[in-house]
Amino acid sequence: MKLLVISDIHGCPEPLQKVLETAGNFDSIIMCGDYLYHGPRNGVPEGYDPKITSSILNKIKNQIIGVRGNCDSEVDQMMSEFMIMDSFSNVLTEGRRIFIHHGHLYERDYLKKMLPPGTLIVSGHTHVALIEEEDGFIFFNPGSISIPKCDYGKSYGIIELNGSFVKIRLLSATDNSVLLEKTY
């Protein structure tokens, strides 16, 4: 199984379209929230156009596994033809559970108490990309494709699963180069 992972689009259609065109083939798309609005703490991102962003996302709605971000609201759901208001989602594979959330509601220690070891926990929110293993859990944040807040720049991820084997790649949304790769 191959999953594309995108977070924190914040209404920017250009990097979203570029990632969708260059990421290759995948089975589903994990979206970690903050689809259309940029929030009051961020400036208006370059190329901000939530209507076009919504149109792009609606065209791929059947592939999206989405969760609500802290900037997502009922108005955003009205623009979206897929579910965005759930605070979390789970993907159960033959060899591994994937827990998906935005990152603003559930803290790491809480999730480690609530989920079984071996769970891959995918989130966004911070706009800071990371791949880490801690106490038998794997934490993955693909960063942001529109408003990055780390040295990696605009980024997204690919998760490849085969039984309990998982390969996680962080890629540049600018040039599609591999920024970080880990296998578990």
Image: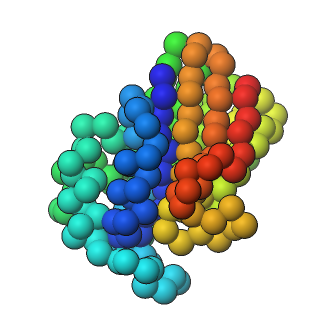
Q: On the rendered image, what quadrant is the C terminus found in?
A: top right
Q: Is residue 174 left or right of residue 59?
A: right
Count of picture labels: 0
Q: Position of residue 111 (x, y in %)?
A: 65, 42
Residue 149, compared with residue 174, is above or below; it is below
Residues 134 and 132: in front is 132
Q: Is residue 6 left or right of residue 37?
A: right
Q: Is residue 102 visible?
A: no
Give residue 52's position: percent from left, percent from top. Answer: 24, 67
Which quadrant of the figure has residue 36? bottom left
Q: Residue at x 49, y 56 (%)?
A: 7
Residue 98, compared with residue 55, is above or below; it is: above
Does residue 149 show up?
yes
Q: Is residue 76 left or right of residue 46?
A: left
Residue depicted at x 22% and y 70%: 51
Expressed as whole percent of the image width and height from the top left, the position of residue 60 reads 26, 44
- In this view, the residue in front, 136 or 147, is 147
Residue 28 in which image quadrant: top left
Q: Nearer the viewer, residue 61 or 175?
A: 175
Residue drawn at point x = 38 percent, y = 48 percent: 20
Expressed as whole percent of the image width and height from the top left, the position of residue 92 reads: 48, 23
Residue at 59% x, 69% y is 148
